[in-house]
Amino acid sequence: MNTTVLKIVLDTNILIAIIGRKSPFRWIFDQIIAGQLILCVSNEILLEYQEILERKTSQEVADNLIHFLTIHPFVVKTDIFYQFHLISEDEDDNKFVDCAIAANAVCLVSNDKHFKVLKTIKFPKVNLLTLPEFVQEFKDGLT
């Protein structure tokens, strides 16, 4: 049994990929619900989740998920006190990087190519994983 609870940050594209009941990655969301993973978010991240979910689903689905994320005990709101500006290609992506650093998350999960620059930055070190890499590294230990 896994006793270590991992703190993670999920890019919006990953959140959308894991919430569907029929998603092959649903187990990740289920592990957040069960408390085996702690999802770290900031106000900025929640606003982006809301905006994209409204666009891809409906106002009701977006509202319900955001409400869940704001009250669930295994979703931790992280205050960002410093902006590192590590991603220059798409500055908007920095909210996820800053949250991962501030929360001391074990990893930031994203399939977005703009995040690849993090692999070359030595400090502050952010462990970037794509969704397939996250599955490979953590699935057996979490399910």
Image (cartoon, rainbow, N blue to C red):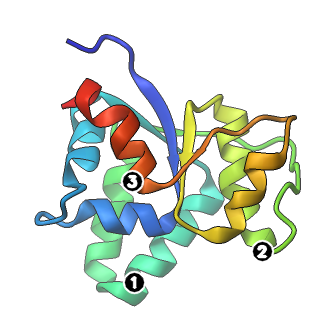
Q: Which comes before the other along the chain, label 1 or label 2? A: 1
Q: Secondary structure at mark 3?
A: helix
Image depth: mark 3 or mark 2 in front: 3
Left or right: residue 8 versus residue 36 is right
Q: In front here: 120 or 79?
A: 120
Amino acid at circle 3: Pro
Relative height, residue 138 to residue 44 (above, below)? above
Q: Compared to 124, does 97 lie above or below?
A: below
* Image quadrant containing the N terminus: top left
Dot label at residue 54: 1
Marks 3/2 in contact by CB < 8 Å: the verdict is no
Q: Which residue is mark 2?
A: 90
Marks 1/2: CA distance? 22 Å
| Residue located beneath label 3 in the image | 132
Q: Quadrant of residue 127?
A: top right
Q: Could you tell me residue 83's position as x and y percent?
A: 86, 50
Mark 1 or mark 3: whose residue is earlier in sequence: 1
